Image: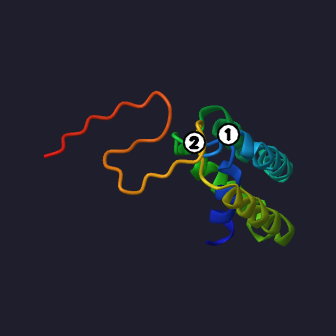
Amino acid sequence: MDGVELLVAALTLGVSNGVTDATSAVVRDAADSFRGLVRRRLTGTGQEALRTLETEGTDSGIWQVRLTADLIRAGVDRDEQILSLARELLARAEAAGPRTEIGPVDARGANGVQFGSANIQHNTFN
């Protein structure tokens, strides 16, 4: 993972649906602090892209193009201190483990499983 990919992954923590339970409150707080640190280094375009990410989530891809360009332009992708913090944040999130709103799920041997809230899934098993 290069510097920009690492930063984008860390910046999306707590914004995407992957971080939702009480165990991840520490991760979410750290992700918020990390975004604040990076935000101070960005220009208006990058700050706007980061706001879009925070308000609309990861579904819209436009924020990623603008944010990536501004991270490179501002040199954030080469700042070893920020990159180190991003690695630490991602490690924390990984240590917290994937969870759902109901807690850990063991889906070994399951068919047609879907995680999340308010999802619709249609399965046909023959």
Residue at 46%, 27% in the rendered image:
118
Where residue 98 sits in the image (x, y, percent)? Answer: 60, 52
Amino acid type, label 2: Thr
Residue at 61%, 72% in the rendered image:
1
Q: Secondary structure at mark 2?
A: loop
Give above or below for 95 relative to 46.
below
Residue at 67%, 64% in the rendered image:
6
Mark 1–mark 2 distance (CA, rounded to whole Å) = 7 Å
Mark 2, residues whose alpha carbon is within 10 Å: few (<14), some, or many (≥20)?
A: some
Mark 1, residues whose alpha carbon is within 10 Å: few (<14), some, or many (≥20)?
A: some
List the residue tagged with mark 1. Answer: 21
Where residue 34 sits in the image (x, y, percent)? Answer: 81, 51
Quarter-of-image position of residue 8: bottom right
118 or 85, which lies in front?
Answer: 118
List the residue tagged with mark 2. Answer: 100
- Is residue 114 in sight in this rendering? yes
Do labels 1 and 2 touch, CB within 8 Å? yes
Q: Which numbered disc, 1 or 2, marks the residue that appears first in the sequence? A: 1
Residue at 36%, 30% in the rendered image:
120
- Horizontal side of 20 relative to 62 (left or right) equals right
- Is residue 75 in sight in this rendering? no
1 or 104, which lies in front?
Answer: 104
- Horizontal side of 125 relative to 99 (left or right) equals left
Quarter-of-image position of residue 74: bottom right
Amino acid type, label 1: Asp
Quarter-of-image position of residue 92: bottom right
Where residue 82 sits in the image (x, y, percent)? Answer: 82, 63
2 or 32, which lies in front?
Answer: 32
What is the number of the mark on residue 121? none
- Horizontal side of 107 relative to 15 (left or right) equals left
